[in-house]
Image: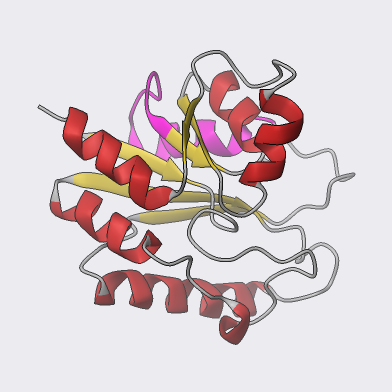
Amino acid sequence: MKLIILDRDGVINQDSDAFIKSPDEWVPIPGSPEAIGRLSQAGWRVVVATNQSGIARGLFTMETLGAIHARMRQVVADAGGRIDAIFCCPHGPDDGCACRKPLPGMLHDIAQRLDVRLDGVPLVGDSLRDLRAAAAARCAPWLVLTGKGRKTWETSGTSGELPAGTQIQDDLAAVADALLKAAP
């Protein structure tokens, strides 16, 4: 099975420092739904792993998050793709959970529920915490320069903080192109 794990905000959709609190605030990054479509059509299973501390902060409910994800799935489906599963951490940064990235708990949950090993599975994110979670779970970290990605590269990439082997691409479309080109 070919599996890819994607962070949500800043990778699939525009990020917001004020959080994405409603389906109307969820705006896809140009080319991301189509990239997921190309991956799906090439036999990749696409899983989203996202920190959503807005729930713990009382900014939106699980029901609203479900509506946001329904919109995301519809936009991706309209582009010929499929999101096979969505995993999220609803906890705040100080809650002490094991599922909030940069900890790998959410990724270990993905491995257990899908009955797969994560060694070398591409994980695409725009923040250092995404990449650190990927490395801790033995995934292959990919940094996109959308969302917070350019800032992550400027602050962490140049200082050597990125996990070893981190691949860097402009956006999710470029990641999909690279993976599909490399596929046998």
Residue 165: % across, % down: 49, 16
The extreme left residue here reads 184
Viewer-nearest residue: 62 or 156: 156
> Could you tell whether 158 is left or right of 23 in the image?
right
Q: State the image coordinates of residue 155 (x, y, percent, origin top left).
A: 76, 31
User: Residue at horizontal 27%, vertical 46%?
Assistant: 45
Is residue 147 part of the magenta span, yes or no?
no
Is 141 situated above or below 161? below
Residue plotted at (14% across, 47% down): 42
Where does the image place residue 88, in percent across and percent down from the top left? 59, 53
Give the vertical position of 4 relative to 67 (above or below).
Answer: above
Magenta part of the protein: which range?
A: 103-122
Q: Is residue 54 left or right of residue 39?
A: right
Quadrant that contains the N terminus: top left
Is residue 9 visible in the rendered image? The answer is: yes
124 vs 104, left or right, is left
Residue 75, compared with residue 95, is above or below; it is below
Q: Quadrant of residue 74?
A: bottom left
In the image: residue 77, left or right of residue 52 = left
| Residue 101 appearing in the image | no
Along the viewing direction, whichever of 108 and 167 lies nearer the viewer? 167
The one of 95 and 22 positioned closer to us in this rendering: 22
Q: Position of residue 81 (x, y in %)?
A: 25, 63
Asked if the magenta segment contains residue 105, the reply would be yes
